[in-house]
Image (cartoon, helix red, strand yellow):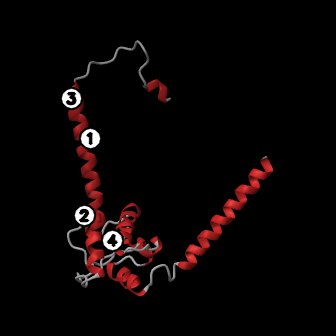
Amino acid sequence: MASEALPHPGDDLPATDPAAGQASAGADAADGVSAVSDEVDGVAAGSDVGEDVGEAPAPVAYAAPRAGLEEMLAGIWGEVLGVERVGANDNFFDLGGRSVLLVQIHERVKEAMGRDVPMVAFFKHPTVRALADYLAAEPAGEGEDEETTRTGQTRADSRRELRSRRRDRRG
């Protein structure tokens, strides 16, 4: 039974040398690292582990942003992401972008362009060139995101109405 192996209060315990314990722990850790290293080497040596999850995206050849809107977007992305060189075909998320950083980029683009840009546009057009093309072709306040906005407003109205009905039932 496991409790038999544990010391009980009042048992005489053998004296231990802290340095010996640390050396033993260090040796155990080194053995563990060595074992993990061997496993990783085995995977790298031709194992098929991970093949069904898909390969990493192939690197995209650098294409300089075109003057104007692409340069402005690339500059904003570079500042927010801390990336020295952002190409026209670089994907925001592949450069390390996350939703939190996208909010910062959204605000800067909105400020630079003097108009609101639907947040969903950044997800639908994740490269500098794609976003620039979308923004250049789309007049302010119009486009494919109008339906998304309308749906969101309808949903918000429905939620308000539901809350109101619940309050009426309680009160």
SS for callout 1: helix
Q: Is residue 160 above or below residue 59?
A: above
The residue labelled by disc 1 is 28
> Which numbered disc flags the more N-terminal residue, 2 or 4?
2
The answer to whether marks 2 and 3 mark residues whose Cβ atoms lie closer than 8 Å is: no
Amino acid type, mark 3: Ala
The earlier-in-sequence mark between 4 and 1 is: 1
Give the percent coordinates (x, y) of residue 27: 22, 40
Task: Determine which residue is flagged by label 2.
Answer: 82
Q: Which mark is residue 94?
A: 4
Work out how far the residue at label 3 is from the one at label 4, CA to CA, in angstroms.
48 Å
Q: Amino acid at mark 2?
A: Gly
Residue drawn at x 51%, y 82% as measured from the top left: 144
Q: Which residue is mark 3?
A: 20
- Disc 2 is placed on an element classified as loop
Label 1 or label 3, whichever comes before in sequence order:
3
Instruction: Give the Cα distance between marks 2 and 4.
Output: 13 Å
- Crowding at dot 3, Cα within 10 Å, few <14 / some 14-19 / many 20+, comes out as few
Q: Residues within 10 Å of mark 1 (few under 14, many from 20)?
A: few
The label nearer to you, 4 versus 1, is 4
Quick one: 79 or 55, which is closer to the camera?
A: 79
Q: Residue at x 29, y 64 (%)?
A: 80
Residue 48, picture quadrant: bottom left
How far apart are labels 4 and 1 at the CA level?
38 Å
